[in-house]
Image: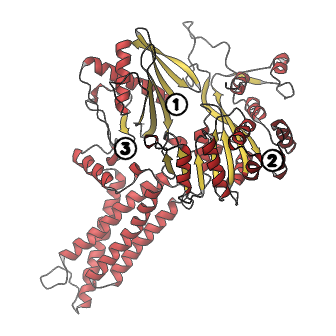
Amino acid sequence: MSCRRHAVLGIALAVSGVLAATAAAQTALAQGQAVPSEPSPGAAFSIVKVVMLFVVMLVAAAAGNWLALDAANRYEKQKEQWYGMFVAGAAAALVLVLAIPTIYAGFPLALAAVVGPMVYYVKTRNAACAPHERAFTPEHLRRCLMAIIRREPEGEIAADRAVHLSGAQHISEEFRLLYMDHRDFPIHLTPQTDQERAAFEKAEATLNAALVREGGAVYLLPHGQEVLVRLRVGGTVRDAGKVSRELGEGMMRFIKQLAGLDVEEHRKPQSGRFVVLRDDKRTNITVDTAGSTRGEQLTAKLYRRELLEMRLVDGGMRAEQAALLNTALNHAGGGIVLMSGPPRSGRTISMYSALREYDLFSKNVVAVESSLSLEHPSVNQVEVDKASGQTLADAIQGALRSDPDVVMVETLRDAESAKMLMLGAAAGKIMIGGLAANDAGEAIKKFVAAVGDPQSVASVLLASVNQRLMRKLCPGCCESYRPNPEFLRKANLQGAKLDVLKREPKNRPVDKDGKEAVCPICGNEAYVGRTAVYEMMVLDDAARQQLASGMSLTELRTHLRKQGQEFLQEEALRRVVDGTTSVSELLRILKPEK
């Protein structure tokens, strides 16, 4: 057991002893007897009463410990409220035990005072999380029981979610990856041959490399008698070597087994997902396979759980922008907020960050996605049931029937889903819709075309947000320089005050052996991490009138610029001026996606 749980149990035992003695004394007084200093056959002391009180305090200690851990993980703003409610219940239980001399009357009331807040908490949190994350369900209790029977070490992870690879001595001592399926059930894979063991080890090493480097995806691509391994890190695809065809296919087999896919199917597209834990950090991985003329190829996309905990300003949005967006998100009469960006721009994470601007304890917030990649514990997530023929519009309509305050649709894929967003906004809901677009104006244009009625869109559209992800220069090896005026002119940056900028190092230092020194921070990648830049178009009444009248987006942008709003190039340029990134990175992210 951990020290924390030892302390909780110790406190519970001490309090139980005090309460038992107090109850015995009260019962003795109620019967007109003296309180004995030593237990005797004639005393009112009863072992049954002691056991009953001991049970109450054990329940209180266990429930309080679990609630504290769970609330801290799931509720950031309201955790103190939950703590206070439970402590008040425990205090009420103490008062009831002391105030009611008859133990058989006080015990049920004290137990109810402890269990009542716990039941209310479990009911509330289960209503707001995915089915497989619900607590005290039959499946959850079964997993807990199986974990206890297996006696899995507490140090690895919580008992009801412990996972390991069977026969895991082959895993490097440098890391330990633990696996679960998308329902949080353990995954046990045992290599049967030396070749299979080698494939498992290589696949795990590749996944670990992606996790350590905070990569976004792993690609296994057949090429002749080899399989190419690629990692997407910082928005760019990097070569991670190549392996033999046999070893590469074994790696695919391992990852497909983790994702619950048919390992014998190599031509038809398949999709699945699983969860990996490294250093107690949870990463969701979605796996897609497809056949090609060269053979089966596999893509594994990584979504880190801690990204869901970020707020907009944590991801790179300026405080002034966040304040404007927050005003739109809390518009009293409802409305639509569009959030857009090209592929791999971080839009989904930003949409979930926007949901964190709400009090998820008091608001009914629903997220609708075609394919669930990230699971949020405090948001009611709805995944389109494609197997039953459900469409995205059907899923949005179903979400609206639950009377939500806010509905987020990760990607609007057709006119029907766009019209459902309009329906929700007309009913006074805040509707957040995601689109693939190169700028905020293009997103508005696409949405208007899907709905087919500019006037209706203008009446409910609150804001349009577009974003990019920029790589951040490594602080350990970036260098300062004076930019070429001609280059700035060609890049349309001549109006900016850019005297001294930073860039990737042109010439790296060498060691005593004449070899290029390796930067300890970035490993000579020149960039470390990424930050988001946002373009925001917040519509005022005049802008809505222009949109309703069919005015062009160029004229609409001109109007908003006069109102002081800045667009993507200006926002990205801020990051160049303050040394966060380079001019070449600015030009890369501003290049329109085809």
Which numbered disc flags the more N-terminal residue, 1 or 2? 1
- Tell me where residue 335 appears, x and y as whole percent: 69, 53
Q: Residue furthest bottom?
A: 32
Name the element at disc 2.
helix
Q: Nearer the observer, disc 2 or disc 3?
A: 2
Which residue is pictured at 28% across the width and 17% down the height? 195
The three-letter amino acid code for the residue at tag 1 is Glu
Observer-nearest residue: 190 or 212? 190
Residue toward you, 157 or 35: 157
Residue density around tag 2, few if under 14, some if 14–19, many if 20 or more, within 10 Å: some
Residue type pointed to by label 2: Ala
Whichever of callouts 3 and 1 sits on the residue coming sooner in the sequence is 3
- Of the image marks 2 and 3, the number of the one nearer the N terminus: 3
Residues 253 and 18: in front is 253
Q: Secondary structure at mark 1?
A: loop
| CB-based contact (under 8 Å), mark 2 and mark 3 | no
Secondary structure at numbered mark 3:
loop
Identify which amino acid the numbered label 3 is placed on: Asp
Which label number is shown at residue 172?
none
Residue 248 pos. (x, y %)? 38, 17
What residue is rendered at 22% in x and 76% in y? 49
Would residue 509 appear left or right of 102 to someone viewing this image?
Answer: right
**56 left or right, relative to 285:** left
Task: Please tell me the numbered disc located at residue 214.
Answer: 1
Which label number is shown at residue 184?
3
Q: Is residue 351 above or below residue 523?
A: below
x, y percent for residue 114: 37, 70
The residue labelled by disc 2 is: 548
